[in-house]
Amino acid sequence: MNLIQQKIKEISSDWELLVILAKRDISVRYKQTILGLSWAIVKPVATMLVFLFAYKQVAKIQDLSGYPIQLVIFSGILFWNYFANSLQAISNSILVNSNLISKVYFPRLIICFSSIAVSLVDFVVGLVVYLILALSLHQSISPYIVLLPLALLITSLFALGFGLIFASFSVKYRDVQQIIPLIVQYGFFATPIVYTTKQLSEKSWFLYYNILNPLAGLVEMFRACLISQYDLLTVQNLSISIIASILVFILGIIIFDKREDSFVDYL
């Protein structure tokens, strides 16, 4: 825990640099784009429409576990986009900023933490779209929406933990960069993003599934914060997700700290 406190202290002491890097990433992301922030709307909405077509027109599925299918799918996509984009940004952050790292010393963790900024902006924009969608479907917003920042924090810890591990090894082993898109691609379907855990919870192996994929509990936590009277989140899968997120975050910090000094040698 002393290491975690030390790293947090380093970041907090250079918070101005973190803000500068975050603003730079946001500016670079939307610079010279016609749609700008609208891309944060287009991508999740387009994904939702594709799955709505597949469910309603092809598979003839009209709802998911008794909740509006549009809200179930969109809330899941909103969660996954934040996690996946954060994971990819953190994993690539050291290599993307290799010129900066090789020229001057500063806590390298700042680069990884600041890389979440773009994903956070996209999430906020997507959240506004979700609220508009829910109201247009005459659905009330869950009172647990006040806990959404907590769900976002836990998800950020999970993304940071894995991202730091990948970032630590990708500097020396560039093959690691090929693994991340596979995780994002297959993880989308292995996690209840466009479906719920209701069907899975009836299986005898559901506990092992939750342990192997803590994101299942996190996405259901997101839905509980957004969809009114959503009752598929259990104490068990939530606890597993929180514990896993904290452990992965700590492991990521430890590995990053051990390999940080060798980054310049391979950049």
Image: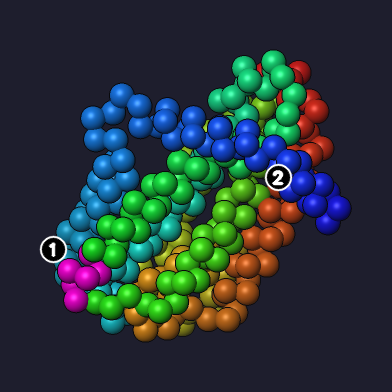
Against 224, is 9 above or below? above
User: Which residue is nearer to you in this view: 203 or 43?
Assistant: 43
Q: Work out which residue is located at the far right of the displayed protein and give it.
A: 2
Task: From the top left corner, tell me how far across and down residue 117 is, in percent.
Answer: 50, 43
**Residue type of the residue flagged with mark 1:** Gln
Secondary element at image label 1: helix
- Please provide the residue range marked out in magenta: 133-138
Which quarter of the rendering shows the C terminus? top right
Against 33, is 115 above or below? below
Where residue 12 is drawn, which disc sits there? Answer: 2
Task: From the top left corner, tell me how far across and down residue 129 is, in percent.
Answer: 27, 57
Q: Residue at x 43, y 55 (%)?
A: 80
Q: For this view, does 47 lie left or right of residue 222?
A: left
Instruction: Compare marks 2 and 1 and give the one earlier in the sequence.
Output: 2
Q: Closer to the camera: disc 2 or disc 1? A: 2
Q: Tell whether position 134 is magenta.
A: yes
Where residue 57 is drawn, which disc sits there? Answer: 1
Which quarter of the rendering shows the N terminus? bottom right
